[in-house]
Amino acid sequence: MEKNFKKIIIYLIFFFPFYLFLNETLRGETSKGLHNPLVLQDIYDSYSPGLHMEFLEDAKRTISIEEILKDKNRYSKKLTWVHSKKEILSFGFTNSAYWLRISIRDISKEKKLWSLVFTYPILDKIELYSPSGKSGYNKRVGGDSFPFKEREVLYRSNIFRLNELSKDVKTYYIRVTSSSSLNLTMELLSSTALEEKISDEQFFLGIYYGLVIVMILYNLFLYVSIKDKSYFLYGIWIITYGISQGSVNGLTFQYLWPTSTWWANINIPFFIFMNCIFILLLSREFLKIKKHSVLLELVFLNISYVLIIFLALCFFLPYSIVIQIATVVAIILTILCIFAGILSQIKGFRAARFYNIAFFAFFTGTIIMSMKSLGLLPSNNVTNWAQQIGSSLVILLLSLALGDRIRIINQEKKLAQYKNREAQEKFQLLVNNTNDIIFTLDKNLNFIFINSAVKAHLKTLPEKYISKNFFDIIYDSSSTISLAKNPIHEKIDLFLQNKETITFKIDFKIQVSKEPKEMQVTLEYITDNGKDEIFGRATAIHEDALIKNFNSEQQQFTIENLLINSEDISYKITQNINKYMEPKEVTSLRLALREIIINAIEHGNLNITFEEKTAALLEDNYFNLLGSRRLDPRYKDRRVIIRYSINSEQAEYTIIDEGKGFDHSKFIIDAGSKANEENLAHGRGIAMVIEIFDKFHYNERGNQVTLIKYFNPIVESTL
């Protein structure tokens, strides 16, 4: 027992210091990366160093190269390095700095010049510490935080020459920070492989951006030629997309703004938002979203307004925030555009099929690139260029989609034109073969069209009416110009305001004889090519077949204070005297009765004086005056009573209002003279009565008048 104990003591005394030395040596070698160095051989010209890397997160960005080198030789390590298990190191959006280290040994017999290439161009700051001498390190920098001309190799990607490599193990330290996604995809290439890589990239990028430029010019040219807004929006979208892709690829920093390190970062989210705005506008226009979904149209419009706000925020918020917002927005809008395209295709919009294929290709390319960046897919020509391939297909397929859309629209236009011609031919056939007068008026009641039936009814060629006003063809007696128009004017004013179909009777002028032609007119609003027009039909009023059996009638009506009522009631109470009088005489009698009824409403019940009416007509405020008086509590309940009787000898009419009356004797003496002398638009009603009726009589108060018309007047003998 004692012997064994002594052996243990001797072992510890002699071998423990050796163990400590050996352990420290092994740890020191491990810290240098000797446990898994990258060994360069003759048979390879390119390596992916990811699996040979170790990384260290510096959350506070305070660790310096001196601390790392000092910690390397300590027995008790304070810094924890993590060995990479992936070829591609991706840390996403982070505020931390990351340190990388790699040990490389070149055992190739052929002396090669090696370069470390960071294939993700938009890293803010890269610091490479390469070994120099026994324990020294040289610092070199790259990234878009420094002017482009300060790069070791003037290329879109960050490239560092590793001239120190030899058969001895060399350990390199790299510190990387970025406000963008920290995607550390690296390649170690010989000079031959680097030249091939640059040549291949320039070839593919030349084809890609050549396609972009050609499609921009092509679509803007088509816009100038065809004037289709879709081509303009498409051209601008390609411009914004091309610039955003050029920034991600490092080309805009190389060629457009090599000294503007601030704009080199800010422009990426700025043009992503611009790209999103124009793809929304293009999708709205191309897919005619409003036609298929009003809700989706509102969503597109509101998102466009929000994106304009994001454009401004690019200049105020930290880049790390806006680039994340831009990335999320781009993904959401891609999905939204795919949904809109599918919806349009389901709704029957055939041109949406190319649109859907285009965005599916773009979405697939984006997914492949993202999976490659995350290390889920291998790095090769397909995965490396998936984004460019997908966007190239979008550019080409959307161009095809626009062409297909124009073709479909042209086919639809031709079909619509054919149907329109067919409809016009049918319309012309119906219009020209009807006995009714068919016409259209503009909003000012001027004739736009009138059919040939007007020639049969009013004895005038249709073209004579074009641009004439509807009121110009209404019949007036020679002594009562404009009086026939007032009630109809009121009715049509209401029609123009309410746009509700109206029907009324009216006398038109027969141009040759200047005699009236009674017709029933219907007016209704129609819309033609986005313009409001008035469609009218005038139908002749045929003589009542039973009028030959008419003997006599006697009735009483009570009407409200509406001028329209005077028009309708005057037709009603004169309908049957057509048996005893000529149409022209009936029209004159009806007009005289209507004017007396209007006087009862205006001057009697509504207490409107001659002077008030004159002023209102001159100020074009007549109907407003009528409306206000009808609502006046003093007058609104007043009514006009009309009694009449007709027999084979005479027609007798009594009109009674509830007004205060007037001095009728003065008006009878001066009947019409003042109105004629001063060319007034009213004041001729009593003059018409004196001229047309054989007898008339006012009561003493002046609010009741009796009118008599003899059908066979007795001529008194002068003998």
Image (tube, rainbow, N blue to C red):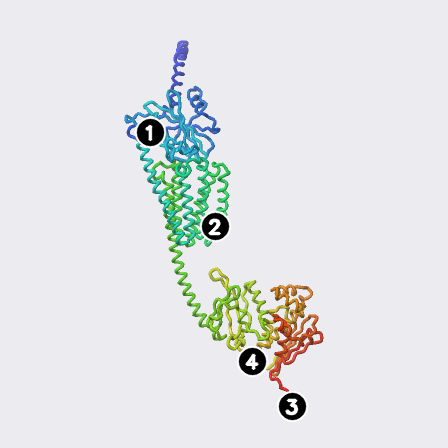
Question: Mark 1 vs mark 2: which is more N-terminal?
Answer: 1
Which numbered marker is on residue 582?
4
Which tag is nearer the camera, tag 3 or tag 4? 3
Q: Between residues 13 and 566, which one lies in front from this camera angle?
A: 566
Whether residue 87 is visible here, answered yes or no, is: no
Q: Please state, as top left, top right, bottom left or bottom right, where the N terminus lies in the image.
A: top left
Tag 3 residue? 719
Q: Amino acid at mark 4?
A: Glu
Question: Mark 3 vs mark 4: which is more N-terminal?
Answer: 4
Tag 2 residue? 296
Residue 672 on image: x %, y %? 63, 74
Which numbered marker is on residue 37?
none
Q: Amino acid at mark 3?
A: Leu
Identify the secondary structure beneath mark 3. loop
Q: Amino acid at mark 1?
A: Trp
Q: Between residues 150 and 333, which one lies in front from this camera angle?
A: 150
Which tag is nearer the camera, tag 1 or tag 2? 1
Identify the secondary structure beneath mark 2. helix
Q: Quadrant of residue 2?
A: top left
Q: Which residue is situated farthest in the right direction here?
A: 700
Question: Mark 4 vs mark 1: which is more N-terminal?
Answer: 1
